[in-house]
């Protein structure tokens, strides 16, 4: 008997990756665009309504102004003496101090958008609700419940309206 080697194939297995939508907001401000991109890149949140809910809450809290102290004063982190500060209005002493400690440890500016985005997605309160936002198929109302546990807002304000506005503005690319 003769040995017949197996026939070699030229095909190489192709790695199949799940589709991850990329959302953009052409009509948003530079700070809003940066936040939307950062959330997608660092949190693996792919649901449009989840992203819109997070964006709507940030807008209600700070209008995407990172150096804002509760009441509207534009000051550095060290000069906000009462109330909340920054993108999500970190109010309690532990959350406010956490922002400062995080930025000192990781070399970021606690008054900057970049520093606050880094802290926000790493903060314990955000990490606890993150799995809720990484799912799919929920409504803005459903996501808003998780956002409440994240922020514990006292005033509902326009956050829901803002979230629906973002849902209309955010497009898939």
Image: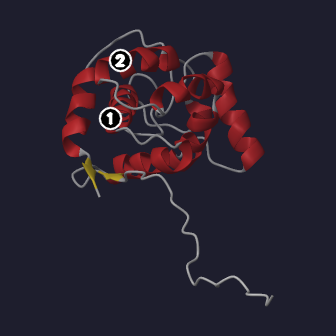
Which picture quadrant has residue 142? top left
In this view, the residue farthest toward the bottom is: 2
Q: Is residue 83 visible?
A: no
In terms of sequence position, does the residue under pointer 2 or pointer 1 come before the other? 1
- Name the one closer to the observer, 35 or 2: 2
Q: Of helix, strand and loop, which one carries label 2?
A: helix
Residue corresponding to mark 2: 142
In this view, the residue farthest toward the front is: 1
- From the image, state whether disc 2 or disc 1 is nearer to you: 2
Q: Where is residue 23 in the image (x, y as percent from the top left)?
A: 33, 50
Q: Which residue is at 54% across, 68% downward?
A: 14
Which picture quadrant has residue 55? top left
Q: How many numbered markers are drawn?
A: 2
- Name the one closer to the observer, 154 or 68: 154
Residue corresponding to mark 1: 52
Which picture quadrant has residue 135? top left
């Amino acid at each position: 008997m003769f040995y017949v080697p197996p026939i070699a194939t030229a095909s190489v297995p192709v790695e199949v990756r799940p589709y991850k939508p990329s959302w953009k907001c052409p009509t948003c401000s530079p700070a809003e665009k940066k936040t939307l991109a950062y959330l997608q890149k660092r949190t693996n949140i792919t649901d449009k309504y989840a992203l819109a809910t997070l964006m709507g809450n940030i807008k209600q809290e700070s209008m995407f102004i990172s150096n804002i102290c509760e009441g509207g004063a534009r000051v550095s982190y060290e000069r906000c003496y009462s109330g909340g500060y920054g993108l999500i209005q970190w109010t309690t002493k532990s959350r406010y101090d956490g922002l400062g400690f995080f930025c000192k440890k990781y070399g970021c500016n606690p008054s900057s958008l970049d520093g606050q985005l880094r802290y926000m997605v790493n903060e314990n309160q955000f990490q606890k609700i993150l799995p809720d936002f990484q799912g799919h198929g929920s409504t803005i109302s459903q996501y808003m419940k998780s956002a409440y546990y994240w922020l514990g807002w006292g005033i509902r304000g326009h956050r829901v309206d803002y979230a629906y506005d973002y849902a209309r503005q955010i497009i898939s690319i």
